[in-house]
Amino acid sequence: MDLLMPVLRRRWSPREFDPDRVLSTDETDALLEAARWAPSAGNSQPWAFHPMLRTSARWEAVIPHLAGSCLPWATQASLLVVNLCQVYVEGTDWQYSEFASYDLGQAVAHMTIQAHSMGLAGRQFRAFDKDALTAELDVPTHWEILTMTAFGAAAPDAVRDAAAASRADSVSWPRP
């Protein structure tokens, strides 16, 4: 019996987004709300997001910091989200939480699944100049940019490669 939720089985990361699709404020808010509901150690929610719609001035400021490898599909996306985690307690060199990056990953996963449940797609990436983006967004020293996520509708002619529809048996545990 297959108990996996259909939205998880259908999830994929397209390399082509529909450049004509514009996300509404409500859709953007729903993605961020999904992240807010993610679990975190001690409910600390050590994450923050810089969302930029393709139609915004902030978008134009971020695009020059992306690597060439992601420009073809990232610039087609409707929304780019810079994903940050809190690494230090403000004003100290004390680690905020040893779980901060894990917790951020949970929040981004929640956004990704929310996107797919809305008929959208998300593609996570780390192909950008982290130092330049940190300066561009004036990120406080106790926060760190880890990744970005592109959201939008997959292009109508985007093809889901066969590897996206299957997974290797890479998770194992002792079974009776």
Image: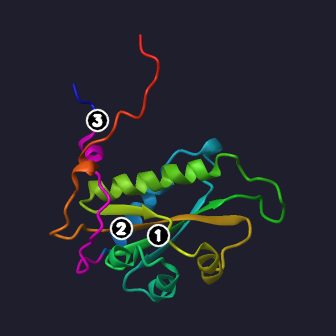
Q: Is residue 10 visible to us here?
A: no
Contact check, label 3 and label 1, Cβ < 8 Å:
no
Left or right of 162 on screen, residue 49: right
* Callout 1 amino acid: Val
* Callout 2 amino acid: Phe
Mark 3 surroundings: few (<14), some (14-19) or many (≥20) residues within 10 A: few
Furthest-right residue in view? 92
Work out how far the residue at label 2 is from the one at label 1, CA to CA, in angstroms.
8 Å
Q: Residue 121: percent from the left, percent from the top?
A: 30, 62
Q: Residue 145: percent from the left, percent from the top?
A: 60, 66
* Callout 3 amino acid: Leu
Q: Secondary structure at mark 1?
A: strand
The residue sitting at 77% across, 58% down in the picture is 89
Report the number of numbered marks: 3
Mark 1, residue position: 81
Nearest to N terminus: mark 3 or mark 1: 3
Furthest-top residue in view? 176
On-image quarter of the C terminus: top left
Q: Answer with the quarter of the image where residue 25 lies.
A: bottom left
Q: Residue 125: percent from the left, percent from the top?
A: 46, 64
Left or right of 148 on screen, residue 144: right
Residue span colored magenta: 4-22
Say above or below: 104 vs 42: below
Mark 2 surroundings: few (<14), some (14-19) or many (≥20) residues within 10 A: many
**Residue 7 magenta:** yes
Q: Answer with the quarter of the image where residue 156 lies.
A: bottom left
Mark 2, residue position: 151
Left or right of 72 on screen, residue 94: right
Q: Which mark is residue 16?
A: none
Nearest to N terminus: mark 2 or mark 1: 1
Contact check, label 2 and label 1, Cβ < 8 Å:
yes
